[in-house]
Amino acid sequence: MRVEIKLKTFFRGTKPMPSFQLASRNVLLILITSICLDGNFLFSQSTEEIAKALSSIDPTIAKDKFQEVFKNQDWEEVRNQINGANAKSSAEWKSITTKEGWEKYSNLKLAQLKTSLGKFPEETTQLNYKVLKSIPRDGYTIECIAYESRSGFWVTANLYRPKNATQAQPGVIICPAHHTPKENKELQEMGGIWSRAGCMVLVLDNLGHGERRQHPFESADSYPKPFRSSRQDYFFRYDLGVQLQLLEESLMGWMYWDIHRGVDLLLAQKDIAKDKIILLGAVAGGGDPAAVAGALDKRIAVVVPFNFGGPQPETKYPLPADAETTFNYAGGGSWESTRNLRLSAKDGFLPWVIVGSIAPRKLIYGHEFSWDQENDPVWKRLQKIHQLHGTTDSLGFTTGRGSVKGSSPEDSHCTHIGRTHRQNIHVLLEKWLDIKGVKDTPLESLASVNLKCLETKSAKDECPVKIQGPLEKLAQAQIDNALKKYPTPMTNETLASFKKDWSNKLGAIASTMAAEVISRENTISENISITKALLKTEKEHHVPLILL
């Protein structure tokens, strides 16, 4: 017999909380239903009566001061761990005084970063790409292309080519923000202005966006009730990230590899200037993968990550004078896995370390809104890193105006990279790479539909963009390997190995102290024996428990 119990509240004075919220907030009340009911009661009562009896039990355990303890203990624990990671990273930074010391530290952190991202295909995998159509424009051509990032998994992109180029062309890759796919007006403008100036510009669809969306909600017609169709690509980043994490992969890892293969594509062009590859990451969700790809792929000469590494648009402005010791170097990005990189705080490859590891190559440190340059502790670290390398001339910045909270013309909101933000980028690219003659004026944009790549069934069949197939193959391979590694029945040796592997995946799971019973109460209600207990399982960590 199955009895379902719905407890309206866990603590007195709290509101009912849906199960998905409980899971996401890691509520620590544990309900153990080892139900020992009197036999006559069990068989003489209906399921409804039993459920009613159980539902009448007051689940409150925490009272008085423990109400506040439960409310804050998880957040406090996480906060303390983040503060500890920041302090550890700062202490390690203070110990670095030479270029060799920084390179040793940086190489270790980048190796840990790459390991955390998942597994990658062989570097020797041949790059396949198709030009699906070409669109002539004034001074340049737009090619709607697709290239194979992983076996059986393709990237849709627009490649802007200059017309009548007389010399090797710098290559620009633009990683869009999470707001829109590749066809956005700002992206078209950047493709046009830089291709007119003699550059080859690749604008790709991020994984899960545009033609590479992994959900069915393409338009308002996809669902009978009103919903924000334009935001579904963004919302489903979370689901896609979880799917990849289940296979020990990551959304950031797959996005990085798409960019890496984009560099391969540019370098395969006969007219490309191989030493002039530029990577730009747009303001929201584009700067993160651009910074990671820029740090890991040494073929990229200039990296322009927005809103990653230091203060974010949401960071209080101006910064306090003691920001060196109080700044949250670990960063934060709500539910976006690309902004909360797995193991980054534990292993120390914090955002500032990733951006700093681009040195001695050229970096433009991008900020969407007003930037407190004087008090930014990350900027000071970037300056010192380039001083150690003797490359202070390879460090620049670009910044906007106002605040993310404002809505006036003085607040430099943009969808990807606005004209305000591009001004100093043009200055630095001319200085560093001799990219001259950039006329950053408004260009007539095409309708989004004109820049789609997979317009025919044959194109969709030849260039599959759905991730389900590759993930199923990956999952099956992992299952097969696990069955070989852990055959049943398990021996003691195999079981020990199994537990060790789980411990490695879950982190520190062994308790640091024996559980202490803070309080215990035994009662009987409706022939149900009830034990309520409050346990202290770790330092300052309490678990309420009900045993029926």
Image (cartoon, rainbow, N blue to C red):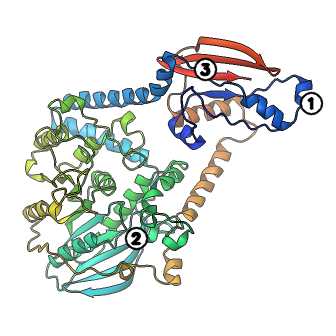
Reply above or below: 527 against 122: above
| Residue depth check, mark 1 versus mark 2: number of the one nearer the observer | 1
Q: Nearer the viewer, residue 165 or 484?
A: 165
Cβ atoms under marks 2 and 3 closer than 8 Å: no
Which residue occupies 74% across, 40% down? 488
The residues bearing labels 2 and 3 have C-alpha atoms spaced at a distance of 61 Å
Q: Which amino acid does label 2 sit on?
A: Leu
Q: Whole-percent x and y of residue 338?
A: 39, 50
Quarter of the image where the N terminus is located:
top right
x then y, percent, for residue 277:
22, 64
Report the residue marked by disc 3. Answer: 61
Please name the residue that numbered disc 1 is placed on: 44
Classify mark 3: helix, strand or loop: loop
| Lower sequence index among marks 1 and 2 | 1
Q: What element carries label 2?
A: loop
Which three-letter amino acid code belongs to the residue tagged 3? Ile
Which residue is at 23% across, 62% downward?
A: 417
Query: Horizontally, is 245 left or right of 428 in the view?
Result: right
Q: Distance between the residues labelled 3 and 1?
A: 30 Å
Q: Position of 428 compared to 138: left or right?
A: left
* Whole-number angstrom distance, CA of label 1 to CA of label 2: 71 Å
The answer to which quarter of the image holds residue 134 is: bottom left
Residue pointed to by mark 2: 127
Above or below, 494 against 266 in this view is above
